[in-house]
Image (cartoon, helix red, strand yellow):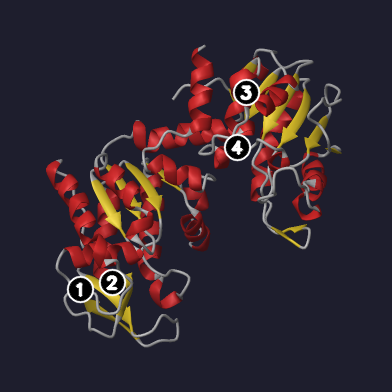
């Protein structure tokens, strides 16, 4: 993927005195008006700094929550985000309301534009609204990969009409990492997909099966694949009606000489609880009243050895209920294997809420090549879908 970048424009001196509109993803979790996680804010600061240091007049645009278009409730306001962003940046970031007709900001200064999702036509990518956004700036910067799967006025429409269009550092890093992890991957390529239901990841599994050398599944997804393999999964979470779909995935892998390693042992319990009595069982010895909550130690070792043979690793989802210590070992062994293989030179990318949580839980964040902030955009990329906001950046780069 080739896109123009904000850093390249800054190095060329093309931002000095220009009006720069940055679409950031500042949709941080809030509780009673207080930001409870600043990860997205911190990740968005570099783009603002690059533009300011290059002498631009900067406007930052974002959404927060799910406001009704045309209505802005107090809880939908970006006021607390603007205040905290200013503190992180080290200079004031005033909040501007009623900004569609124009914004007054001097070079070297930055303002926050009130919640763009309150603007009528934002979600439908209305052309009139998109042109209003574009008229505000000389340079439009998309630094919000988390919204790249949404074709909205602030992510796609404005990029059609702004004079100059580029990717911010966060967006550029995501594009580079995901391309390296999948489109331009160094073989052997291994993908790990966990989750509770096959139905939520079926498109991802089908797409990855055509690309990877090894596909590992975990969680409830594994249980359905075990049913497809003729195994008894007892009282485990599974989707028997999707067994044929799992067999299709297995057939795709087999046809291209790839594989999906099946477990030889599992950790089972009679209740979904950390306090429940549990045991390691052969995959052929799961009792009717037991549920599978993790892979067993032999399987974890087998998967760790598979990781050691991979040059590219894409990870989306844990192997078991890692939040409960009795069922954390499988994901722990996998995480450590990915970290060790990355240390040896493999490229690894992890994404998705549960995966990012596992990376933090097992303290390997600095030993994974790239951790995606994308959420839904990351999943749609794995599905093989075109991300509209990335596509328009590529299109404008060719113009």
Q: Residue at x 67, y 34 (%)?
A: 46
For discs 4 and 2, the disc positioned in front in the rendered view = 4
Sequence-wise, the earlier of marks 1 and 2 is 1
User: Alpha carbon of mark 1 to alpha carbon of mark 2: how far?
Assistant: 9 Å
Which residue in the structure is indicated by mark 1?
283
Residue 389 visible: yes
Which residue in the structure is indicated by mark 4?
144
In the image, residue 250 above or below residue 233: above
Quarter occupied by the N terminus: top left
> Which label sits on residue 365?
none
Mark 1 lies on a secondary structure that is: loop
The reply to whether dot 1 and dot 2 touch (C-beta < 8 Å) is: yes
Residue 310 visible: no
Q: Mark 1 Cα within 10 Å, few/some/many (few <14, many 20+)?
A: many
In the image, residue 118 above or below residue 268: above
Residue 135: image quadrant is top right
């Amino acid at each position: 993927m080739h896109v123009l970048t904000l850093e390249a424009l800054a190095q060329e001196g093309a931002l000095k005195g220009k009006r720069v509109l940055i679409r950031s993803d500042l949709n941080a979790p809030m509780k009673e008006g207080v930001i409870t996680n600043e990860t997205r804010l911190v990740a968005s600061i570099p783009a603002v700094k690059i533009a300011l240091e290059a002498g631009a007049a900067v406007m930052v645009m974002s959404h927060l929550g799910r406001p009704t278009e045309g209505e802005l409730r107090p809880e939908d306001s970006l006021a607390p985000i603007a205040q905290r962003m200013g503190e992180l940046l080290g200079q004031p970031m005033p909040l501007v309301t009623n900004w569609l007709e124009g914004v007054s900001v001097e070079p070297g200064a930055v303002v926050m534009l009130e919640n763009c999702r309150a603007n009528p036509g934002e979600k439908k990518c209305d052309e009139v609204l998109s042109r209003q956004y574009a008229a505000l700036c000389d340079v439009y910067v998309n630094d919000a990969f988390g919204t790249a799967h949404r074709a909205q006025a602030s992510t796609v429409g404005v990029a059609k009409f702004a004079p100059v269009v580029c990717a911010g550092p966060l967006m550029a890093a995501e594009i580079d990492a995901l391309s390296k992890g999948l489109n331009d991957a160094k073989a052997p390529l291994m993908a790990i997909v966990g989750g509770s239901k096959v139905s939520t990841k079926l498109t991802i599994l089908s797409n990855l099966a055509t690309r990877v050398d090894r596909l590992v599944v975990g969680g409830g997804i594994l249980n359905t694949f075990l049913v497809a393999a003729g195994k008894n999964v007892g009282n485990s979470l599974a989707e028997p009606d999707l067994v044929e779909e799992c067999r299709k995935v297995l057939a795709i892998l087999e046809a291209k000489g790839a594989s999906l390693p099946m477990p030889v042992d599992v950790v089972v319990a009679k209740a979904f609880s950390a306090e429940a009595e549990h045991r390691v069982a052969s995959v052929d010895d799961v009792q009717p009243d037991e549920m599978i909550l993790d892979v067993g130690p032999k399987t974890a070792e087998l998967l760790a050895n598979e990781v050691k043979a991979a040059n590219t690793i894409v990870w989306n989802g844990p192997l078991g209920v890692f939040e409960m210590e009795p069922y954390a070992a499988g994901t722990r062994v996998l995480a450590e294997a990915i970290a060790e293989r990355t240390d040896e030179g493999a490229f690894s990318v992890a994404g998705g809420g549960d995966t990012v949580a596992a990376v933090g839980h097992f303290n390997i964040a600095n030993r994974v090549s790239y951790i995606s902030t994308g959420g839904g955009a990351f999943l749609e990329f794995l599905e093989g879908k075109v991300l509209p906001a990335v596509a328009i950046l590529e299109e404008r780069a060719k113009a």
